[in-house]
Image: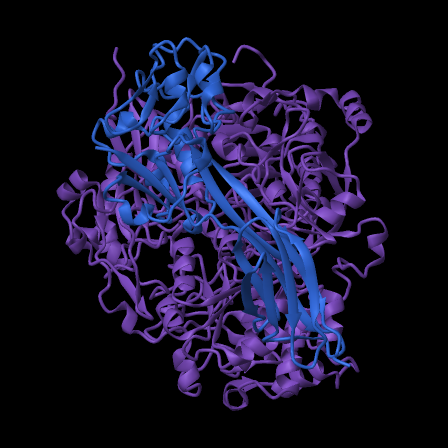
Chain colours: A purple, B blue
Amino acid sequence: MGVKFKPDVQNIVSYSLMGPESGGPCLVESTDGKITRIRPYAYDMEYIKENCNPWKMEARGKVFEAPNRATITPFGLGYKYRVYSPNRVKYPLKRVDWDPKGERNPQNRGKSGYVRISWDEAAQIAADELKRIKETYGPEAVLCQSDMHGEGKNIAPSHGCPNRLLALMGGYTTQMRNMDSWEGWFWGAKHVWGCEPVGEMMPMTNLYPDIAKHADLLLFWGCDPETTPLGVVSHMPSRLCYWLTEIGLKSIYICPDLNYGAAVHADKWIPILPNTDVALQLAIAYIWITEDTYDKEYIDTHAYGFDKFEDYVLGREDGIPKTPEWASEKCGVPEWTIKALARDWAKKTASILHGNGGPYIRGPYSTEPARLEVMLLGMRGLGKPGVHQAKMIEWNMWNKDYPVPYQGQFVPQMPHICDALRTVDGDVGPEINLRRFLLTPEQEKRAPELKELFKQLPAPLQFIPRTLIHKAILDGHAEWYGLQCFSSSQIPDENNYRKPTTEYQFEKMVYPRPGLSRIHMMWTDAPCNVTCWNNGNLQIKAMRSPEIECIIAQHPWLENDCYFADLIFPVATKHEMIDIGNDLSSGGYTSVYLTGKCCEPIGESLSDFDVCAKVAEKLGKEYYDAYTGNLSDEEKVRFFYKATGCEEYMTWEEFQERKIFIVPCKPDAQELPAGLYNFYKDPENNPLSTPTGLLEYSSTALEKHFPDDPERPPVPKWIEKSESHDERLSSERTNKYPLLCMSNHGRWRMHAQCDDIVPNREVETMKIRAKDGYQYEPLWLHTSEAEKRGIKHGDIVKVFNERGTVLCGAYVTERLIPNTCYVDHGSRLDPIVPGELDRGGCINSITPTSMTSKKATGMAVSGFLVEVAKVTDEEMERWKRDYPEAFARKIDEAAGVCLEGWLISDDC
Amino acid sequence: MSKALVIDVARCSGCYNCQLACKDEHVGNDWTPYAKPQPQIGQFWIKVHENVCGTIPKVRIHYIPKLCNHCRKAPCLEACEHNAIYRRDDGFIIINPEKCTGCKACQEACEYDAIFYNEELKIAQKCTGCAHLLDHGYELPRCVEACPTDAMKYGEEEDLKDWIEGATVMIPETGCHPRVYYRNIPGKFIAGTVYDPIEKEVIIGAKCILNSGGKVWQVNTDEYGDFWFEDLPVGLFDLVISAPGFEYKGFYNLKTSKDLNLGDIPLERAK
């Protein structure tokens, strides 16, 4: 048969990995049942531009416009490799020496390997174990590890399906996500400016048109607009950065690394030691106060407690004035550069930009730089035209009105079938715990067929923060403050105002709750605690605990936490199922689209929803019926479309034909006041959601609840070390571990997703193929630090501390400040000694156990002490001799760790 | 009909989409007679080259995607003795995988290392300009279509006139006359920060005069005491930095074979 140059089918599939929302559209072309190519979706394929009311921003005589086609990301482009990855779980697997009726061998998790079993057997085992655990200990003995992110799918979402089934069975314990990309904002900045729900500036209305018109200086403070937006937005932030430079705005990047944004957009890079931004910020405040160059009038009317802050900055409180000289020694920025930055900023109109993650927001005591940043903005008249905190990511999240004017004239309301992070009833007030995963009254009116499927199920009775899962298992109990819900899902009022939720941070929580069981079983659909959370090695120890009798994982790929599961269910990717997608985030247009199957599910994989239906079937017909609502996938797609409200604009028939509804852009989006302009103009009538309604330079809530907390005092401080963390270059620990390890969200992964995309792995900043042929995760090291250690570019190196050792490939560079090293987070684990030594570059396996601080239940996974050394041939030979089974596992030459490496029998 | 590709290096964000899209199109897909499948790893029909220039903190990066130049005077075509290489009307040069004998003569002849040898299929392979797509209703080669910053432009050479003006080609001295043009490939830089070591403050407005064989460049230090001489040719330079109230400071015989960061430069107080 001849070559077919035209595809049999084209489907629109999401390229975002943000889940539950789908994200930007790409065009997937398939021929003979196989995906041939993935392209950016062109908005003019089905529409002439005028129908979409395309947006544009104008400033200083130049125009920035809606793009003609989606700016596809490397994850979208490379997804064929995800679908056909040699790392796919193709059929149900059982750990070879785990016998639910006999020896369970928990100590062998991460070592044993797997055998193929039938769906029938797998579902039966799962159902039997669930029943047994529930009868023996109570329903709370099952920990449900669901979460967000993952593939954006709607009718069968990647996350939350097990919760749905477990809720039907009588309950479970929830793993509650911490604010993993916003830690400092949530636990710190909220106490300065409220800004519900996560403590980043809110509202973000109309920010970029305003910045383009009024700002002249952009401070990218730990922000990488070429990296973190990729999994969530698109390359629109990149285009925006080029435009802002073109119209004359100066971009200064303050970060330890010349990140990918700085590499191409920076007018100046100010390298700073990881997690020392507090020193720089205090010195800037010192200059402004002593040189009298801040907006005093604004502070008089918009701030509370400035005198206490001033006392600390000037050294009246502790005898140490926070001078540039004082700061320089701590943060590594020359004294003269600190002064120059402070003075330039004082003269100009500046906004600070962020892209989530970044070197200071996920480190030890990240509350402090986050709070100080807001305070500095306050000293410059926060809310004034051009003076904002703006984000290069999540332009739609929690915003009624977007910062880039691509929003539609209405917001399609996509129903969410599962609630992965359901709050315990009574933990937070009903107005906060909005239960956004119910059908809204409007949705129910539009699509009454969905009523049964969306019947509210009982909430779980207890939760454990994701940062404390390991300790909760190993210690049998845990105590912490706050985190009763992932983020407040309340809807803002017409003034974009949300009720304050900071009070919840002061409540002490416990596990187990009185009368409820400890956990004895885990079911995860987000198997990445080892790769993405705090102290992954401790997580491994917890998963190997005999307390845990059964671990189930459901996932498309065999990776990370999956290696510790006893039972693994194969899951189909978004390209293998029908769905309805929604894009509110990619920054081109908002749209709703119909996704067809690009290929048949790989092996025996099923959608996440159907995986749990298989288990429900074994539990009994009543469970199956209640779980599935007896709707087919096709019916769900149809009724979901109804529920979105799009049908008022486009009939179902037309939608089926066009496959996409591009929501015409809101015509008056740019007329709205930008950011916190109303607060700036009239703070009395537009108060912030802090207790005083003002910017709190000394937090009244912290004064009331934890006045003596040395790790999060009412006025933010420089904390050299304290009970939770001793992670500074001044520490005695530097005798052994002299480098500060920084770890941001990856350039080539969305957290732990997409580590196996082969073409990406051939880019040297993604993987470094060392002399043994293995593709190691790059570890960045400044030329001088490499020289000191006799390390050459491309060498196999080990990065280590008290918590373990990780092997990497040396990336020797001028792009990183000395005294540090850098590893992207999220590389897949490839354990040589589980819990001790990893070859895969999984840097989170050695991140600190302690949280943001004692009373802030976030994680501190960037800016911690390590040492780096070259791995000698002798050392590698010794490991190979001592752990032959780890080195015997097959590694795919192109894709890395793979299913075959973990399979025991050869009949699969 | 004569097509060209223009790449604006100043607009290339180093996202690698071009390289990844090319792999998506050609690895595992058989487009005979235009091209047989590219091997899973090791070949780069378009490859992004990352150029890290300077030393901390004066570091800049530019990316240059390189691919077959579809030369007007193509040594590969001339070297092939098996009539396997031909030029299309639109200018693209194709290695016919069915005629290629794997003799490697073309690979050796290519001035740009743009031809790869497929060990398994025993044939030479390279960029086809995605001719198989262009012949079947697609408008753009995959690399161009995937570029999110519009750094790559593809079209009739005549239509791209404004873009090509002032552009360069890779190693023009080969005389191969590439159809792939590059704009804004930066020259070398000399940069530094000037400061007063007594007051520990940067010196703003310091006069920096650069001289090379009589040619003179001048910049003043900015708000951060920084000076940047950009887009310099490779050569020998003398630099004199002066500011009122300070002794001048000279740097002589600076070689721009590499980009130069002169670091943080203290100026002594005038006596």
Residue nearer the viewer, B143 or A30: B143
- Is residue B72 something one can see in this rendering? yes
In this rendering, position of residue A424 left or right of residue B167: right
Residue A377: x and y in percent read: 53, 76
Residue A531: x and y in percent read: 61, 41
In this rendering, position of residue A15 left or right of residue A193: left
Q: If the image is split into quadrants, where does the C terminus of chain B sit?
A: bottom right
Residue A3: x and y in percent read: 27, 16
Residue drawn at x 25%, y 23% is A5
Residue nearer the viewer, B232 or A675: B232
Residue nearer the viewer, A179 or A363: A363
* Vertical placement of residue A643 versus A558, above or below: below
Q: How many marks?
A: 0
- Is residue A712 something one can see in this rendering? no
Residue A67: x and y in percent read: 29, 52
* Vertical placement of residue A721 versus A294, above or below: above
Residue drawn at x 30%, y 57% is A440
